[in-house]
Amino acid sequence: MTPPRTARVPRARLCLALALALHGPLALAAAAPSERDALMAKARDERSAGHRVDALAHCQEVLARWPDDREAQTLNVALLTEMGATTRARELAARLQPPQSVGDRVHLDADHIAHEIRWANGEPADPRAPYAEADRAVADARRLADDPQLDQGLRQRAELDLLVALDQAGRADEVVTRYDALRQRNVALPAYVERAVADALLVRRRPAEAATLYEDSIAKDPGPYGAADFEPRIGLMYAYLESGQTDKAIRTIDALAAKEPTWTRVPGIRAPIQNQRKVDADLNAATLREYVDMPADAYDRLLPMSREAPANSQIRRELGMVELARGWPRRAQEDFNIAGTLDRRDVGAYIGEADAARVLNDYESVDEDLGVAQTLADRNGRVARAVQSWNRERGWQFDLSTEQGKGSSPDFGDRDATTQASAASPLIDDHWRVLALARYSTADLPEGDVRRSRVGVGVIGYARGLEAYVRALPAADRYVGKTALEAGFDWSITDHWTWATDYSTAGDDAPLRGQYYGISAKTLDTAVTWRASELTQARLGLSRDNFSDDNKRTSWTASLTQRLHTAPNLALDGGIELGGSMNTLTDRPYFNPRRDKSYAITGRLQNLLGQFYERAVTQRIDVAVGQYAEQGYATDWMATIRYGQTFQPRAGIRLGWGIGWHNQPYDGQREHRFVLDLTMHWGE
């Protein structure tokens, strides 16, 4: 029984049609022309209805009976082109007699290029040459776009396709150059081209223009989009973020995540399947929180996603990034390893592993991880930035800090200043640096001026989770004349516990007033810190100073800091600080109470004032109010307040300034001090 014309063609017949299209028609017995006309009519009707495979089946049946039928041959080429089999279509078109017109041949080439561009979105045939397919599409599209003999309409189509191909090939510079030229000619871009250009503008750091193009593309084509098409609202989120429109970025991605259903249904499949667009929206909503210094919120979003889809490499990688931001490099490293195992081509996983190793001072593997990332995506701006950051970190490091004080206190005098400068060599064998260090301190005391000057060298050593140093700083002043031999370490025992210790044979902990009288001190400071995350931290420190006048001072400090409020690029912390000291001798020429203790309620506000990529300005306000008690004197209040800013004009350079005020009693006499501090860091 012959099926009605609207019925679907059986699977076997479709397979036969495709086989004939790809391998050539089979010679069958001739039939009446009326049958040929009926088959061609069916093929045209099916094509008009969008049933291209069915149309191809009818067309192949005609060619099987009438191999030289020019109309069927032409329709066969057109159907193959529309279905994406443009390589075979071009082969068959080359055999047409009479040959295709120049215009038809160029149209076919343009269709082939369009499909090449789509194919370049898939997995590369050779992971070591990730841009090979995209480069091929670029070369073919450029050949048409730059051909002055072409019809203007075809040439403009090729120019637009070339923009998309260049973006996929990681050639943002040429995309933007060609886009600027098209804009001068007032060429209107279709939505799919606007999305590609917007992506390139983001790479070229023109986010405001990128946002405008994304908005226009969404207005022209609001979706839904094909499974292989990029969701432009995600790109729009990043454009808003990088142009300083943080609130818009959050609203955009949250609206997208709320709109997308968790599950979708596919015709012919009984059970629903996970909606990948929902996963992408939720993933980017979490990632955005990490970018705006809200890692706890990002973690709370990513952790359940990772548990629901433990084999999703993207989620694992982003979870690792957030764990790194929360101060858990070891945990982050585990997730980066898992992500890299799940997807050997996940560039972000290799960058993450390198970043975690750098935090842990485990420098040996960094070059290898970044080398793999470069191989997989050598034109990726993120990889280039990671490599540049690593080159800055392993290169020269320069630091300069100065503190200028004015007031009246037994230790500091009416005016005082402390300056320190250091230069650290590039990494040596991934484990060592040579350090040059200079310190200079002065104070205007009632009994006269005093200074402490030291210049010396040292060595810094690195191992996984450990930084240790030794240095020698001979005195360059006439007051004490002792060489300070110093050593110490900072050991990150786990992601939550650290232990730091510093020792000096003539430490700068000794008051400058004691320096005036030729008194020095051997100092030992040690502290243990427990850090749950960026939200909670506790610290206990102990110090022992053995003065050369036989006085021995023991002191302790304890603090607890808790995050009170987090908003985009803003953090408010509160806490408490306790401390105390004991001296074995009193009546020394420097402040040394027999016993004292203090407590203070602390607060800190830190927020971003402005940012454009690496260029950023932040501000910080610190306040502490409490009580100070000294044995033999009345308990009274004390307070400290400081305001400061940090400016980063470009990656690798940070400049800071701050002004503070402190007030507390010393031996029952209330003293105050104003302080201006300046800092500079060059390196990473």
Image (cartoon, helix red, strand yellow):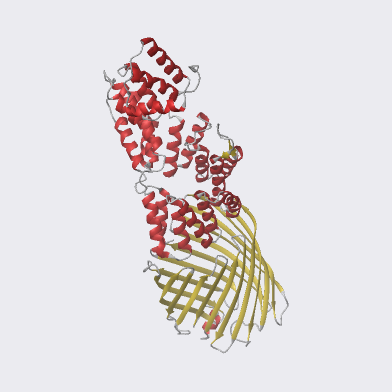
Left of 400 or right of it: where is 604?
Answer: right
Q: In which quarter of the image is residue 199?
A: top left
Residue at the spot 55% in from the left edge and 86% down from the top edge: 547
Residue most extreme to the bottom: 550
Query: Percent position (x, y) of residue 404?
Result: 52, 69
Q: Is 487 drawn above or below residue 422 in the view shown?
A: below
The quadrant of the picture occupied by the C terminus is bottom left
Left of 134 or right of it: where is 661?
Answer: right
**Foreground of the two, 345 or 248:** 345
**Foreground of the two, 536 or 407:** 536
Q: Is 368 drawn above or below residue 149 in the view shown?
A: below
Residue at the spot 31% in from the left edge and 30% down from the top edge: 144
Q: Is 379 drawn above or below residue 643 in the view shown?
A: above
Question: Does residue 524 appear in the picture of this structure?
Answer: yes
Count of numbered marks: 0
Query: Percent position (x, y) of residue 171?
Result: 36, 42
Question: Does residue 391 appear in the picture of this structure?
Answer: no
Left of 439 or right of it: where is 608?
Answer: right
Residue at the spot 40% in from the left edge and 73% down from the top edge: 436
Residue at the spot 58% in from the left edge and 72% down from the top edge: 528
Residue most extreme to the front: 1
Q: Quadrant of residue 471?
A: bottom left
Q: Quadrant of residue 423?
A: bottom left
Query: Percent position (x, y) of residue 605?
Result: 61, 58
**Foreground of the two, 368 or 592:** 368
Query: Percent position (x, y) of residue 544?
Result: 57, 81
Residue most extreme to the right: 634
**Foreground of the two, 542 or 300:** 300
